[in-house]
Amino acid sequence: MANADAVVSPGELSISGSPVKFPMEPMGDACFVEKMESDHRGKIMIPQANGSQGDPRAEFVFGKVIAVGPGTFSISGVRTPCDIKVGDIVTLPLVAAMRISMGLRNELITRGSTAEYIDKIMVVQFEHITARLL
């Protein structure tokens, strides 16, 4: 297995510690997050609202940030970068995580990416990330 801090070139992402060809990059405040198994359960408690058991809006997932967009522009035209960086472990509501669609998935495979890794990636708007594990 490759080093988790492996340097990747443009058009690549470090997924599961390995550089993987990925001909797409996040724009604005979007982030690419690799879904992690919930081995952090028991180490952090995220309260749920009463009666929310089984409600997908109340379910949280853990992920490792693998790419971050450059940020958004303020009203004055100044770019505001995201507060997270590649490698951060974050939590987010399950409903905020967008999977890569089948059409885009097929296009990425055509351009040389690997299906195994594409299926691990979620696209998330920065504003939906609820916490960063320290």
Image (spheres, rainbow, N blue to C red):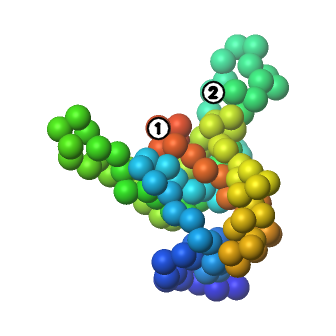
State whether residue 106 is above or below residue 91: below
| Marks 2 and 1 in Cβ contact (< 8 Å) | no
* Residue corresponding to mark 2: 47
Camera-nearest label, 2 or 1: 1
* Residue corresponding to mark 1: 127
From the viewer's perspective, tell me whether residue 41 is left or right of residue 129: right
Instruction: Identify the residue at horizontal 74%, vertical 19% (top origin).
Output: 52
Label 2 element class = loop
Identified by mark 1, the residue type is Glu
Q: Quadrant of the N terminus?
A: bottom right
In the image, 129 versus 125, the foreground residue is 125
State whether residue 15 is above or below residue 75: below
In the image, 27 versus 7, the foreground residue is 27
Give how far apart the Cα atoms at labels 2 and 1 are. 19 Å
Instruction: Identify the residue at horizontal 79%, vertical 54% (top origin).
Output: 102
In the image, 78 versus 81, the foreground residue is 78
